[in-house]
């Protein structure tokens, strides 16, 4: 990296003077607008967004559209102006439909990406604000803490034991310590130490800093211009659909050429056969598959966003339907994250101490609560636990501000997951007061005294027993301690005097138990991994239904093996088999560190699980990436966790995860229904014409009739299927295997069966019409045309789940389906009653017997399809 020598070689005061900003007040709103105009947005170049013109132009690039345009030219060449115009109208209608669908999908995705923009905490006009990161300007005063992503290059002004992960820029995996002072002759390493760079993340501590560079002027902007590499997210499902369309295109082009040659050799008109081949190719290829899939995904993502689940990556929508295990934390996800201190057990009393009138030791314990918190403002604490502790201390007459006025803070030792404690250091006359809070086991292990007495092992055990009693009531337990020494430079976590236990109540969410039951009915295991103790974890897990008994198995993080096999072939040693089996069976894990969560995920994945995992801290990022679906907390989650995740829960609620799994299944099922419907309809059109050519009969469908059918059935009913709300029983089905493709062999069999049934009924009606006296070829064509058109419309009801009721299912309840059918019937009515369209399509009015034949033939696929579903459902019940 090359340092910004114009700023970062200055002192912190000099950098602020250079930017003309007071760190205590920040920039004014007027000055922010001026600098925004001068420097532009804080972005690395806007991601390329498709213009409406490029989207429209792309509608005419497909091979099939070019074939159709060739057919238009052929029609005009042979003097068939009306047919050429009709085909051109079809081309334009296809293009407009595709354009509208695609531009809605593209704009929806752009809007969803806007919702996921990162934010930054700044000080402006003397107030702390949270703003979108692109609104940062040079001179902004930025406040950073552990878990934040640095969104611009900044010079540190105040620093509290801060470390940054700069591997994005340097490749170094070891966090870099930060400070505010420069050496007299600063080296590049010194300059790095007083600077935080855009794109890096804060792994520890906090700071106040001034922005020195934004956008392309940052180190990250100099290293890589992301404008040229920005690409839209594409899900594996969309890739598979495009591949399917390409394969179908190849197959149908071969069939088209073969049928055309066979027809010509059989003595049929060359021009008619060429046009028929072109029409069949267009009819058989569902070009709209990827567009409708994107629309369905975008609509599903909007619905999820409305239900507080923001999808960051398209692929997560597909994977959600395959999730077999949810690894969730406790606080705020299963509980309300509204903590209240309900018990204080101080060292000078055997019974729980009074929170309003505490004993002397109780006062010292509450003083720790008032002093020991992260950050510099006790009124703006992001951690609900710390806020509850500060509030309890204030209620007992020890408000943080007043207490700090007599005991000014000198230093903060941020919470360290390795030791499970944090500390702050305060000046107390000529000495220094260290106040510590953390996990009871860790604090007791670091303590040497309890009150005025040496802390013996029996005393430790007594306090651990009391901790377990409190935990069995579902309380979250913290221990507090202190020591007084003559220096501020000593290990804060040794030689402590233990002061007591603090119990905090965080009740389960009202909807958590129902959501856990819903997940379990859906075949999805729920496993809780918490940093709290085993008894607290078990109590909450039992309250929400994760475990059923008060003595359910609870494993701890240190029970996990240090390494996990990467592949199934890496089998554990025989001695480890029982332990791994117990770990895989456990539904509650206590005292879990982020690294242990990572190993737990790897273990379950190695045994075939598809995992959705929740996380909020900076250290959760590796596990969120490792999980099949990483889910970050929107309220208490760090920016690092959010950027590593596939999905963000805006309300932190477990119920939103179950909604997301349900919606993921619905989206996949809808796209599958849409594809199955479309392919069976298109194949029936191909088979109707193929059967006539092979049996020597006249063509039952003319080229323009095929194109018109394609417009009617390909667009509206298929889109309505893609937007269905889903079957009610979809959460009572087991998860879909992750590697399962969109269409399984059973679906291809269903496509072939439906197409053959429609072909047989239409062919029978066509043969019947040909045999009638005093009729023309147009009469028979009209019967075949309407029999197939109506048959395909009724066929949409065959797309219901075989487990759903015949008259009460998501297809019948889908208003869009009825709207699509109504619109299609209107178009078909125009085809038979509007003379210009009737003439172009070579249709003629039918008598009563013709309509009887049409209705009967069109209902056959529906009746046979419903009977087949009923038989299949009856056989499953046996």
Image (spheres, helix red, strand yellow):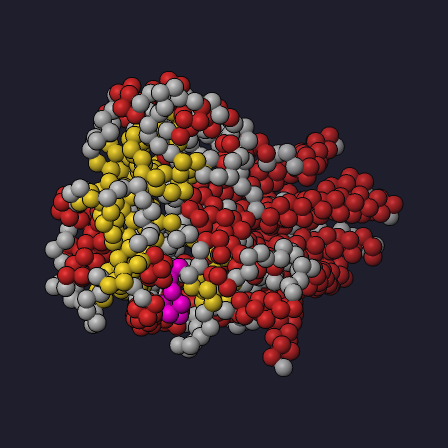
Residue 333 at x, y percent in the picture: 38, 59
Q: Residue at x 53, y 67 (%)?
A: 583
Residue 207 at x, y percent in the picture: 32, 36
Please indicate, yes or no, whether residue 310 appears anywhere in the rendered image. Answer: no
Q: Residue at x 38, y 65 (%)?
A: 533
The quadrant where residue 54 appears:
top right
In the image, 128 versus 557, the foreground residue is 557
Residue 468 at x, y percent in the picture: 34, 70
The quadrant where residue 741 appears:
bottom right
In the image, 785 versus 169, the foreground residue is 169
Q: Residue at x 51, y 54 (%)?
A: 598
Boundaries of the magenta span: 531-538
Q: Residue at x 40, y 59 (%)?
A: 531
Residue that sits furthest to the bottom in the current view: 878
Residue 649 at x, y percent in the picture: 40, 53
Please indicate, yes or no, whether residue 324 appears anywhere in the rendered image. Answer: yes
Q: Is residue 331 magenta?
A: no
In the image, 388 versus 726, the foreground residue is 388
In the image, 151 versus 39, the foreground residue is 151
Locate the C terminus by quadrant: bottom right
The quadrant where residue 733 appears:
bottom right
Main secondary structure found in the magenta portion? helix
């Amino acid at each position: 990296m090359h340092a910004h020598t114009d700023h970062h070689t200055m002192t912190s005061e000099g950098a602020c003077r250079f930017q003309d900003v007071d760190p205590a007040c920040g920039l004014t709103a007027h000055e922010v607008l001026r600098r925004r105009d001068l420097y532009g947005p804080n972005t690395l170049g806007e991601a390329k967004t498709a213009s409406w013109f490029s989207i429209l132009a792309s509608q005419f690039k497909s091979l099939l559209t070019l074939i159709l345009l060739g057919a238009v030219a052929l029609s005009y060449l042979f003097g068939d102006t009306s047919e050429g115009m009709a085909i051109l109208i079809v081309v334009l209608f296809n293009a407009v439909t595709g354009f509208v669908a695609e531009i809605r999908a593209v704009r929806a995705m752009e809007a969803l990406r806007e919702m996921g923009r990162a934010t930054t905490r700044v000080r402006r006009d003397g107030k702390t604000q949270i703003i979108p990161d692109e609104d940062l300007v040079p001179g902004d005063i930025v406040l950073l803490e552990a878990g934040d992503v640095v969104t611009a290059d900044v010079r540190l002004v105040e620093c509290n034991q801060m470390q940054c992960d700069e591997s994005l820029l340097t490749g170094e995996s070891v966090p870099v310590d930060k400070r505010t002072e420069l050496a007299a002759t600063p080296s590049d390493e010194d300059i790095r130490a007083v600077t935080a760079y855009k794109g890096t993340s804060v792994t520890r501590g906090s700071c106040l800093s001034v922005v020195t560079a934004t956008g392309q002027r940052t180190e990250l902007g100099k290293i890589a211009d992301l404008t040229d590499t920005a690409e839209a997210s594409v899900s594996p499902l969309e890739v598979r659909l495009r591949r399917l369309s390409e394969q179908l295109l190849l197959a149908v082009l071969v069939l088209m050429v073969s049928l055309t040659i066979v027809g010509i050799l059989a003595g049929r008109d060359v021009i008619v056969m060429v046009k028929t081949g072109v029409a069949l190719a267009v009819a058989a290829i569902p070009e709209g598959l990827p567009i409708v899939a994107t629309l369905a995904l975008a609509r599903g993502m909007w619905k999820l966003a409305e239900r507080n689940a923001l999808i960051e990556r398209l692929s997560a929508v597909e994977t959600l339907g395959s999730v077999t295990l949810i690894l969730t934390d406790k606080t705020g996800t299963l509980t309300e994250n509204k903590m209240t201190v309900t018990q204080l057990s101080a060292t000078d009393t055997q019974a729980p101490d009074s929170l309003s009138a505490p004993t002397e030791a109780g006062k010292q314990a509450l003083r720790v609560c008032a002093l020991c918190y992260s950050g510099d403002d006790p009124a703006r604490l992001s951690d609900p636990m710390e806020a509850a502790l500060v509030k309890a201390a204030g209620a007992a007459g020890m408000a943080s501000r007043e207490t700090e006025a007599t005991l000014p803070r000198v230093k903060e030792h941020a919470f360290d997951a390795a030791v499970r404690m944090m500390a702050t250091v305060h000046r107390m006359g000529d000495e220094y007061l260290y106040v510590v809070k953390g996990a009871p086991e860790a604090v007791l292990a670091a303590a040497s005294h309890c009150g005025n007495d040496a802390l013996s092992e029996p005393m430790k055990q007594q306090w651990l027993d009391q901790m377990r009693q409190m935990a069995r009531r579902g309380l979250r337990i913290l221990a507090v301690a202190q020591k007084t020494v003559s220096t501020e430079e000593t290990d804060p976590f040794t030689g402590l005097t233990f002061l007591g236990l603090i119990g905090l109540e965080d009740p389960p969410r009202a909807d958590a138990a129902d959501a856990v039951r819903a997940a379990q009915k859906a075949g999805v295991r729920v496993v809780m991994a918490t940093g709290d103790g085993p008894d607290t974890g078990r109590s909450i897990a039992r309250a929400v239904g994760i475990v059923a008994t008060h003595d359910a198995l609870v494993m701890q993080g240190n029970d996990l093996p240090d390494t996990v096999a990467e592949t199934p072939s890496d089998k554990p040693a025989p001695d480890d088999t029982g332990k791994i089996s117990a770990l895989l069976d456990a539904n509650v894990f206590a005292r879990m560190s982020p690294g242990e969560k990572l190993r737990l995920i790897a273990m379950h994945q190695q045994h075939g699980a598809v995992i959705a995992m929740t996380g909020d801290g900076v250290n959760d990022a590796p596990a969120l990436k490792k999980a099949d679906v990483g889910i970050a907390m929107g309220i208490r989650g760090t920016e690092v966790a959010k950027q590593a995740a596939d999905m963000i829960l805006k309300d932190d609620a477990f119920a939103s995860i179950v909604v997301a799994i349900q919606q993921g299944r619905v989206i996949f099922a809808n796209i599958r229904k849409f594809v199955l419907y479309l392919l069976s309809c298109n194949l029936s059109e191909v088979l109707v014409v193929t059967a006539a050519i092979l049996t020597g009969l006249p063509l039952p469908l003319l080229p323009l009739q095929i194109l018109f059918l394609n417009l009617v059935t390909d667009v509206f009913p298929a889109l309505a299927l893609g937007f269905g709300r889903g079957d009610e029983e979809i959460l009572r089905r087991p998860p879909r295997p992750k590697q399962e493709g969109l269409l399984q062999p059973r679906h291809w069999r269903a496509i072939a069966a439906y197409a053959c049934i429609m072909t047989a009924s239409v062919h029978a009606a066509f043969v019947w019409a040909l045999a009638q006296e005093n009729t023309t070829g147009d009469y028979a064509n009209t019967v075949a045309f309407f029999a197939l058109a109506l048959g395909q419309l009724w066929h949409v009801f065959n797309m219901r789940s075989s487990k759903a009721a015949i008259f009460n299912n998501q297809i019948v309840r889908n208003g869009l389906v009825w709207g699509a059918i109504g619109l299609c019937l209107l178009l078909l009515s125009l085809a038979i009653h509007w003379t210009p369209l009737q003439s172009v399509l070579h249709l003629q009015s039918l008598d009563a017997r013709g309509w009887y034949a049409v209705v009967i033939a069109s209902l056959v696929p529906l009746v046979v399809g419903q009977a087949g579903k009923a038989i299949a459902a009856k056989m499953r019940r046996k």
